Structure formats: C-alpha cells, structure tokens
Image (tube, rainbow, N blue to C red):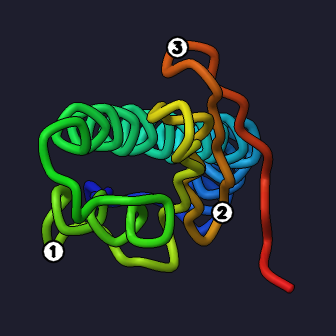
C-alpha cells in the first residue's frame, strides 16, 4: 500500500468553513476599533485647535490687529499646514476678548467644545 500525503478535499473545505465562521465574528469587532480610533483622533485634533485658539487669545491682548473678524484665520495660521480651514471653526468674543467655542470637523466626525475639556463628537457622513 502507498503512503498518501496531503489533505483531502473534504478536509480543506472544513478548514475553510471554520476560518469563514471565525471571520464572521472577528471582522465586525475590529471595525468597531477603527471607528473608536477615528473618534479619538478627532478629539485630539479638537484639543489642538482649542490650544491654538487660547494661544491666539493671549496674543490678541498684545496684538491689536487680531480681532473677531480674523481670529479664525490666526488660529489656522497657528495650527500650520496640517489643518485645513474647512475643518476648523473658532468663535471669539471680541468685546470680552475670550474664545467661546471651537469646532473641528472631519469626514466622519464633528467635535465641538466650549471649555476645552468637555468635548462632544457626533458622527457625520457627508451631505
């Protein structure tokens, strides 16, 4: 009698079926991790926007050219080229000289804050 080496077709089909069943359970779980990671990035970016806005707020006390009309532009300049003007919106009270709120939007999330620590993010999937 010959020694036959290798797997039969039935054994291969069973292994592929088991791997498929495992994939059905694992893929959705990993997709949740990706969404959580995107939200954490959006929150971190909003914290960066808030910090830049507060820095411009302090600079505004010494620079009379900074006002409510150009405050958002100054914040975007402070952030540098890594942020797009469409992603950032900062509301500044020119009379009181304080930042009121900041908003950061990306393709998936819109995050806003009024004090820099309480951040609210909502899912946004385009128009």
In terms of depth relative to the viewer, which is nearer, 64 or 92?
Answer: 64
Find numbered disc 2 in the image and state the secondary structure of the residue it sits on: loop
Picture quadrant where residue 61 is located: top left
Location of mark 3 (residue): 117
Query: 1 left or right of 20?
Result: left
Using the image, tell me which numbered label, if any, was put on residue 108: 2
Residue drawn 25% across and 44% down?
60
Q: Residue at x 15, y 51 (%)?
A: 63
Label placed on residue 11: none
Which residue is depicted at the point 32% across and 56% down?
1
Do the residues bearing badges 3 and 1 touch, measured as CB atoms within 8 Å?
Answer: no
Gap in Å between the C-alphas at discs 3 and 1? 24 Å
Which residue corresponds to mark 1? 81
Disc 1 to disc 2, C-alpha distance = 20 Å
Asked whether disc 1 touches disc 2, contact meaning CB atoms under 8 Å apart, the reply is: no
Please tell me how crowded label 2 is: few (under 14), some (14-19), or many (20+) other residues with Cα within 10 Å: some
Regarding mark 1 in the picture, which secondary structure is present there? loop
* Quarter of the figure that contains the C terminus: bottom right
Residue 100 located left or right of residue 75: right
- In terms of sequence position, does the residue under pointer 1 or pointer 2 come before the other? 1
x and y percent of residue 84 in the render? 36, 77
Please indicate whether residue 120 sits to the left or right of residue 26 in the image: right
Per the image, label 3 sits on a secondary structure element best described as: loop
> Of discs 2 and 3, which sits in the foreground?
3
């Amino acid at each position: 009698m010959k020694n036959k080496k290798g797997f039969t077709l039935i054994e291969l089909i069973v292994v592929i079926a088991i791997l498929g069943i495992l994939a059905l359970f694992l893929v959705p779980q990993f997709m949740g991790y990706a969404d959580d990671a995107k939200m954490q990035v959006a929150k971190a970016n909003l914290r960066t926007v808030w910090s830049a806005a507060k820095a411009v707020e302090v600079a505004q006390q010494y620079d009379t050219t900074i006002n409510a009309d150009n405050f958002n532009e100054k914040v975007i300049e402070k952030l540098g080229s890594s942020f797009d003007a469409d992603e950032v919106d900062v509301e500044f009270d020119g009379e009181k000289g304080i930042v009121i709120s900041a908003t950061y939007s990306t393709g998936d999330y819109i995050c806003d804050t009024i004090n820099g620590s309480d951040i609210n993010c909502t899912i946004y999937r385009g128009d």
